[in-house]
Amino acid sequence: MRLSEFQRAMREEFGDVYAGVLMREHWLAALGGTATEALDRGVPAREVWQALCVDLQVPEARRHGRGLIDPRG
């Protein structure tokens, strides 16, 4: 997952404003920081997206990102 795909998935799943709040404020215990901090440390966007999906209980069917091709299919 490219960073642009991650950003698009965040906006489409959570909306423009809330996606930004989640990026800066939501603590991801699995990654030891916020999504922004994890990306800054070099954690792959796919891993950050998956951690957010688990924490925020995004349905499995949307975990590849709304409007994105399921990489497993």
Image: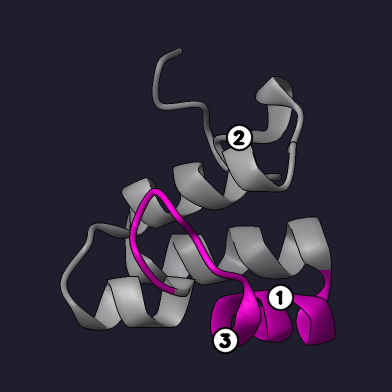
Q: Residue furthest top?
A: 73
Residue 26 % position (x, y): 62, 72
Figure check: 62 above or below 7: above
| Residue 63: image tag | 2
Residue 11 % position (x, y): 71, 70
Figure check: 69 above or below 32: above
Residue 27 falls in image quadrant: bottom right
Q: Residue at x 71, y 84 (%)?
A: 21
Residue 19 falls within the magenta-colored stretch: yes
Distance between the Cα atoms at labels 3 and 1? 9 Å
| Residue 19: image tag | 1
State the extent of the magenta-drawn residues as a range: 15-33
- Secondary element at image label 1: helix
Question: On the rendered structure, is 28 left or right of 41?
Answer: right
Question: On the rendered structure, is 72 left or right of 70?
Answer: left
| Residue 24: image tag | 3
Q: Which callout, 3 or 1, points at the residue further toward the start of the chain?
A: 1
